[in-house]
Amino acid sequence: MARPNAENFPLKEARAIVKSLARPNPWIYWPDFLISAALGWGAFVLAVISPNFGAVQLAALFVATFALYRAVIFIHELSHLKRGTFKLFRLAWNLICGFPMLVPSFTYAGVHTDHHLRKIYGTHEDGEYVPFATGSPLGLVGYVLLSFFLPLLFVGRFLLLTPISYVVPPVRRWAWERASSLTIDMNYRRPPPAKRDDKSWRWQEAATCLYAFGFLALFVTGVLPLKVLAIWYLVTVLIFLFNSLRTLCAHAYRNPGDAPMTTAEEFLDSVNVPGNRFWTPLWAPVGLRFHATHHLFPSLPYHALGKAHRKLVQELPDNSLYLEASRASMFDALKRIWQETREGQNNRAKEAQAGQSRSKAA
């Protein structure tokens, strides 16, 4: 759905302003990821060994959730980094974070690339887009509540479905199409493996399966207490919960999927939440609080998005359309999409009542 005045967006000027910021810096990626992962897993262990429901355990859970959330979200950067680069970083991410959290990087590769294709973004082929704003408020609630079940689905995917799929070809095809993608559209079907997909997906899948069976063996033999599993489930649910709220803040979700958008329309259907420097980076880590800017320039590394946003605000001759994509906070973004779904639902109800009145009159 086109946004007003989208054709007037100063895209050429914006590109000139940010062109010098496109180079990813490994000296930022490595320390950020490793510190986040170390802090997250360290706090995880502290939460396990601390007395239940005590202040220390609650503080450890807080740190583990947001530190591991930040580490996990680097999967987004992996999907944008040029193929063949950051090879050791990709491997380290999977070993330290992707495999133990049951989200190997192949589950996002390709799928997210499609999300940034102009002919796919916002259409029925986009697995990362659901027109929430044109639906019911219950759709928003249902999407957030799904967070409580996702860890169980991921366990089933790699602990049960993976070994079965190795011996049953139809299950193999189904697992690839319907259970191998980090998406928000439950009807999404992943296309057959193609050039856009990570070529290492087969060994990543096998490695994640081995991780799952390894931890299962440790629980069964009593090497690890079941409390570890409970803490893992709780932290994972909290990560999915915050990510679901962040996802609802990432776009306006107004496009019904009938036709692709222009670059400017895609930007104006996306959302920036600059927020404050303390709380906002916790729930929208690794640059994702500048999600509209990211959709405008997908090649910009996460560490350049804040600077790009500030430069665009300051240097665009007319920044009014650019600022139209900004929200003041998570609450502001969620409130807007909630109100839009309510208004749409009320309008549809009124139209239905009017239609019934016309039918009776006829």
Image: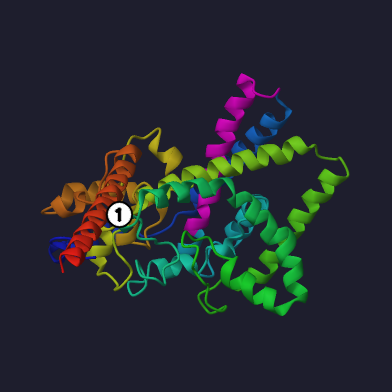
Q: Nearer the viewer, residue 246 or 292?
A: 246
Tell me where residue 263 appears, x and y as whole percent.
Answer: 26, 67
Q: Label 1 belongs to which residue? A: 252
Callout 1: 10 Å neighbours few (<14), some, many (20+)? many
In the displayed structure, 149 sits above or below 178; it is above
Any part of residue 151 in sight:
yes
Give the percent coordinates (x, y) of residue 301: 40, 56
Q: Position of residue 308 (x, y in %)?
A: 29, 51
Q: Secondary structure at mark 1?
A: loop
- Give the quadrant of the C terminus: bottom left
- Magenta segment boundaries in residue numbering: 51-77
Instruction: Name the dominant secondary structure of the magenta segment.
Output: helix
Determine the residue located farthest toward the top in the rendered image: 55
- Residue 293, percent from left and from top: 30, 55
Q: Callout 1, which amino acid?
A: Ala
Quadrant, the N terminus? bottom left
Q: Quadrant of residue 336?
A: top left
Q: Residue at x 75, y 73 (%)?
A: 166
User: Which residue lies most toward the right here?
Assistant: 221
Q: Quadrant of residue 94?
A: bottom right
Q: Is residue 65 magenta?
A: yes
Q: Is residue 86 magenta?
A: no
Q: Is residue 65 above or below residue 261?
A: above
On the picture, is 83 further left or further right than 117? right
* Left or right: where 360 falls relative to 333: left
Residue 82 seen in the current view: no
How is the protein colored in the picture? Answer: rainbow
Q: Is residue 112 left or right of residue 33?
A: left
